[in-house]
Amino acid sequence: MLKLTKDDLTFSPWDAADYLTSEKMIAYYLEEVFSDATPKDIVRALKNCARAKSRLKNSKKAKIAADIEKEMVTKTEFSADALLKTIHALGFRIKLKKLPSAKKNKKR
């Protein structure tokens, strides 16, 4: 049986922003995060998107995203107003979708 020690393993930092390489990928990522996430997950996702968007060479909003990223570094919570401003600055908007309702049991 092969036995590994911690000296045999190497780890490197993983950054979601490295994989968000297009506007489309960023949009899919945010859509997924907003579908089932905690407020802390949403803030982390917005930080990831700001970092990713600031790296996109063809992004017209790269400068804005870089500024957002700098501002968000120390924040862990956002007001609703700050959240919406950040989302809009990244070039997105929130669209609400009604959840499917559970079928009601009809008793007679």
Image (tube, rainbow, N blue to C red):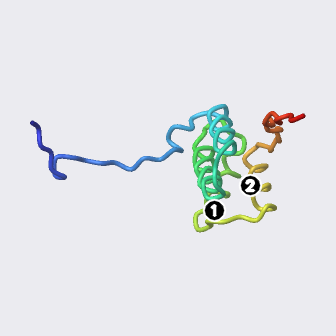
Q: Residue at position x 66%, y 42% from top?
A: 30
From the top left corner, tell me how far across and down residue 79 is, in percent. 76, 65
- Foreground: 56 or 23? 23
* Residue sitting farthest toward the left: 1
Say which residue appears at 81% left-offset and 33% top-offset.
103
Query: For residue 68, what is the image quadrant?
Result: bottom right
In the picture of the structure, the residue carrying the numbered disc 1 is 72
Residue 37 x %, y %: 64, 49
Q: Which residue is mark 2?
A: 86
* Cα–Cα span, label 1 and label 2: 9 Å
User: What x and y, as percent, mark residue 98?
Assistant: 83, 38
User: Horizontal placement of 8 versus 53: left or right?
Assistant: left
> What residue lies at 76% left-to-right and 50% top-to-bottom?
89
Mark toward the start of the polypeptide (1 vs 2): 1
Element class at badge 1: helix
The location of residue 20, given as percent across then percent down, is 57, 38
Q: Amino acid at mark 2?
A: Thr
